[in-house]
Amino acid sequence: MIPAGFDYHRPAELDAAIGLLQEHGDEARVIAGGHSLVPMMKLRMAVLSHLVDLRDIPDLQGIEFGADSISLGAMVTQHELIAHAGLAEAVPLLREAALQIADPQVRYLGTLGGNVANGDPGNDMPGLMQCLDATYKVTGPDGSRQIRARDFYESAYFTARSDDEILTRITVPIPAAGTGYAYEKQKRKIGDYATAAAAVLVGEGSASIAMTNLADVPVWSAEAGAALAAGDREGAVSAALAAIDPQEDMRGPVEFKRHVAGVVLRRAIARALSRVAG
Amino acid sequence: MKDEVQSPEERSAGLKGMGCSRKRVEDVRFTQGKGNYVDDIKSDGMLFGDFVRSPYAHAKVVSINTAEALKVPGVLAVLTAKDLEPLGLHWMPTLAGDKQMVLADGKVLFQGQEVAFVVATDRYAAADGVEAVEVEYEELPVLTDPFEALKSDVVLREDLAGQSEGAHGPRKHHNHIFTWEQGDKDATEAVMAEADVVAEEMVYYHRTHPCPLETCGCVASMDKVTGKLTLYGTFQAPHAIRTVVSLISGIAEHNIRVISPDIGGGFGNKVGAYSGYVCSVVASIVTGKPVKWVEDRMDNLMSTAFARDYWMQGKISATKEGKITGLWCHTTADHGGFDACADPTKFPAGFMNICTGSYDIPSAYLAVDGVYTNKAPGGVAYRCSFRVTEAAYFIERMIEVLAIKLNMDAAELRRINFIRKDQFPYQSALGWEYDSGDYHTAWDKALAAVGYDDLRREQAQRLEDFKAGKTRKLMGIGLTHFTEIVGAGPVKNCDILGLGMFDSCEIRIHPTGSAIARLGTISQGQGHATTFAQIIASEIGLPADDITLEEGDTDTAPYGLGTYGSRSTPVAGAATAMAARKIRAKAQMIAAYLLEVHDGDVEWDVDRFVVKGDESRFKTMKEIAFASYNQAIPGLEPGLEAVSYYDPPNMTYPFGAYICVMEIDVDTGEHEVRQFYALDDCGTRINPMIIEGQVHGGATEGYAIAMGQEIAYDDMGNHKTATLMDFFLPTSWETPTYQTDHTVTPSPHHPIGAKGVGESPNVGSVPCFSNAVHDAFRPFGLTQSHMPHDHWRVWKIARDMGLHG
């Protein structure tokens, strides 16, 4: 559990970080909170010569409120998400989900950007961001572009981001007042990835449903959202379950995961509906 | 003087002796990060070793190329079996009478097996060296199922080819290790044939791992000038390690000093001898420098000793009224690639023959077959006394299975079969003499404490609600009454490698009335420095706070067999009391002389000898201590010290009554432990706070084992649970809340009546949690579902019972 040797870089400017990625190509990786990358390095499943730490870059910091959306820096930690009162009020779903990620020690270091950019199907935030219809800003040598979370994930650990691009900010639309929400997660213990998890938003004539760790990418189902928006709960569940493709692991066999996915989603829908206000 | 005006009660309280919840003296350093663990040991020029491990579960090692590794900056040497062979150290003896490869000798038998040892200037270079060693393997067929292994043509241990006789008698097959039989087979089978009722079940206690927070490790330091080897390590039995090192290395025993510093939990994992110790010693001898080896978590979970893995086929017979008449058990024991169980020599299946439990069972028969498979070796007593946990799980499941067959309440079935108080000392059908017990009193107290009848009524209502669709949660009530057998043990039948399992204590009183005591045991978190000082305080009347306890340094401590199997209090605790009594006997002579009366004319009073009938004339222990360093009595040798080597006349038999109330979500397989009540009877209680801590810790391990913890392999022998992501260690969030209680039934043969408690909660809680799960599904026809009861397995029970609609 000792990584191979590497050079550590800690640029203070985004351009410098991108420059390092260009210079070293496959040999370089960015590191945010390190909770996914460092274990992979220790297992020597990720061997790289240059580690580019993003923590000193101001562009990747901060929580900024716009008129109808919030811009979150990629280096905002789960702890900051949880502790931000304005955020909890505007998008309570974010806080509910972040509180179910690992434990306080992990959340002090683990970042939103790292969680969504890594493409690990076990991470909670990608599905959540798809549910919220968030947009990721990635910046590379040719400038910046915006990618919807719903278009970002291609397969496990493969995303729409190029190797020389850095995910810098996440824009989350503020749900309409009174929108019901829930993040329901079954896990074996604190610190575990989800056996199955569901994010649900439901408001006046609209709904959004996404699920976590039930395929090699987060599963957002337009059909499920439409069914729930129309008041058809079981239709929503059927549509979401039709979109998942769970794999057997130590959490259990496929049949179990499929069943639990339905249970978890029904519970999330019920809780979200119970929270619809006005 | 102040103490002249203190009452005996006040003086007694000031000693902080037995019965006092004295705070742990160890915690001052542990809570400030000032502990001294093996990995804290640093010395000039210290080198680091790390292993190349096998990625395969069964393979020939065709070649090992170390050339590239030796080019890595900082790498000094790479040891392979070829380097150890001239020293005769490429294999080592195991505690179970088998032998084990130190480094792969032509083949590997489990994934993670040690293949080569890289020695480097720091641990980073060592890890880089490990990466650079090139090993060519040729895969062989893998056996992970012990029943298949006994039928397979695949030979795992070619080194034993043709040996029809093993360390424990005849071998029936090339993958068979031993058969161990206890009890009367014919009589038991005859009883079964005539019984009103016979319940039969396969009870599997899955493979798990002690997983101490601190992994195994050592620092070997050979001083080439003095010829003396100092070996620091995470050893639960430092003296036995010294003897073993001497026997296998040929280094004279007086030239070996073994030191166990602070140890961060052992639970049986640190009893055995590991390749890392041997390779570090060899590397230090070769380089002349200290060599450190410390496992990482994956090394620990994959290669050092596992626990359990017993397939227990059982039959239990009874009259139609529920009186048990016989118990039959055939166990298939998966020992992995080498038989490295840590059991007393004459007990290849440990004390599995305590499997008649708390019950008066007239006929019983037990057979255990040990089997080789392509899994890691071990089979250690994970917070238990040599397979007692397996035995307790077996009988407590069989009782439940019998209750189902008889359609009886399981609490009542236990009650009518308990050994009665007046039957002690009780001779069990499988050969043990239980020292003392009062099971009915404990049981009734436990049932009353939880409101058992009300719980059953609530459960019945819940079932109705469930069937009516009002709830999706079932309620399970788990019952367990366990009897342990600890304190190994009497030298007449307990030894390890020929070393009798006595233990020892040496006490020296200083002139000013403080003391140092040294023991043959070694604390791994049990709090010996706290509790053994309390025994001495009560025995000789010096404050526990004025008594230093030392363990773990074989150059200073008296020889002992170490700490495991709940043996420290029953054996070393007894030695401590006996040594203290020798001191008190000498002190009595001195006091009488100084008071100018006959020895018999003074009597002991808390902390002093008093002239009978005249309380104003006395000598305190403190005064006697000072006097003993002068010519206290002409002709009597000066000083005040004693040593005791205690060979216990019998084991001790702690017991307990545990009850668990669990809520189970049939749709997700999740559970919530609503209540956990633990009544322990460990005889005389030395420190109630430490007992409570032991119960909390042991029950939490039991909870983990029952509800999720396992060592799992796939069909290729790949280890599936080598990290703490998949190997379940509960956090504070998952850990249940415990309600502790006790009765006190002293051991009649122990000097202070103490029986030991460290392992009771692991032994008792596993069947209790498991029985709660089974009980929840009993109305739907469930008789047995194997642990661990993690979410998907519990969900599968519900699915198989048709509860998902």
Image (cartoon, coloured by chain):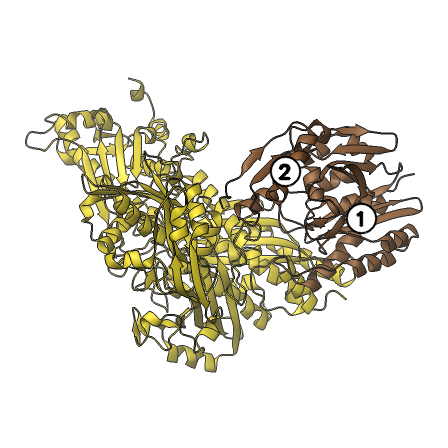
Chain letter belonging to callout 2:
A
The residue wearing badge 1 is A151
Q: Position of residue B217 (x, y in %)?
A: 38, 46
Labels 1, 2: one chain: yes
Q: Which residue is at the front of the view, A151 or B360?
A: A151
Relative height, residue A173 to residue A247 (above, below) = above
Dot label at residue A129: none
Helix, strand or loop at disc 2? helix
Q: Position of residue A156 (x, y in %)?
A: 69, 53
Residue lying at the far left of the rendered structure: B635
Q: Colour of chain A?
A: brown
Q: Which residue is at the front of the view, A117 or A174?
A: A117
User: On the picture, is A85 further left or further right than A111?
Assistant: right
The residue wearing badge 2 is A23
Mark before the other along the chain sequence, 1 or 2: 2
Instruction: Answer yes or no: is residue A1 visible.
Output: yes
Q: Colour of chain B?
A: yellow
Q: Position of residue B415 (x, y in %)?
A: 50, 62
Between marks 1 and 2 in the image, the one whose residue lies nearer the viewer: 2
Helix, strand or loop at disc 1? helix
User: On the picture, is A242 further left or further right than B699?
Assistant: right
Label 1 – label 2 distance at C-alpha: 28 Å
